[in-house]
Amino acid sequence: MKKPIRKRGVAAGAAAAAFVLAAAPASAAPSTVWTVGPSPVGVSATNSANVVVLIELVEDNGIAVTCSRSSLSGGLRSATGNPATVGTVDSFAFGASGAPCSSVLGTMSFAPTTPWTFVARDHDASTGVTAGHLGDVDIRVTWGACVFRVRGTIPATYTNATGRLALAGTTGGLPVVSQTNCGASAPVGASLIVKAGYLLKKTGTATVPTIVGSHP
C-alpha cells in the first residue's frame, strides 16, 4: 500500500509544479517603439517644487543648495530602439532673476551647457510612467572664487497623467570633472546630485505631451 501512495504523491507534486510553471506570466519585453503625442513637439516647463542640489563630498553628506525657481525648454519626438532618445533639453535654468540658488556658503550660479538628451528605457503601461535618464548633462557651478564643472547623467521619469518630469540624481551620476579655487568644498570626483520635478506642457499651451513605449 505504501508504494502506490508514494507514486500518487510524486505525480501530484509534478502536476502542481507544472501548473505553477504554466501559470507564471512571461516577463514583459522591453519597449522598442516610443510614441510621443503629439510628435514632434516643443515643450517648456517650470519646477513644481524647490529644486534641491547636493554637492556630495561623501555619500549622503555634503553641501545642500536650494533653487526656488527653475525652468527648461526643449522638444519630444517619437523614436525606436532601446534605449531611445525621445527628447532634448535645449535650455535649462537653475534659479531666476531675483531668485538665485542659495546655500550655507552663499549664492550659487549654475551655467548648463546644452543640449541634453532625454533617453527612454522602460515604460509601465499600467501607470503611464516612462523611466530613463537625462544624458550629456554638462554644468558649470560658481560661487565666489570657486568654479567647478560636472558632466554625466541624471536618472529621470516622465508621467503621462500629469506631465511631470522627475529628476532623481544619484551618487556618481554627475561627478566633478574639474575645479578651480574650490579646495575640499568641491573636489574632483565629488558628486552633484539634482532632485527636482518639472511640469511639461506643449509650448504656449496647456497640452500635456504623452510618451508610450511598446514592443510590437
Image (tube, rainbow, N blue to C red):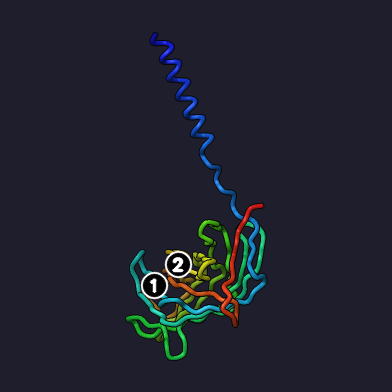
Left or right: residue 75 compared with residue 152: right
Residue at image position (56%, 48%) is 28
Residue 112 seen: no
For disc 1, the marked residue is 54
* Amino acid residing under circle 2: Gly
Q: Which label was assigned to residue 169?
A: 2
Query: Closer to the N terminus: mark 1 or mark 2?
Result: 1
* Amino acid residing under circle 1: Leu
Residue 25 seen: yes
Residue at image position (60%, 80%) is 203
Discs 1, 2 touching: Cβ within 8 Å: yes
From this viewpoint, which residue is outermost toward the top?
1
Tell me if residue 211 comes above or below residue 21 in the rendering.
below
Left or right: residue 66 compared with residue 211: left
Q: Quadrant of residue 61?
A: bottom left
Residue 20 percent across, percent down from the top left:
49, 34
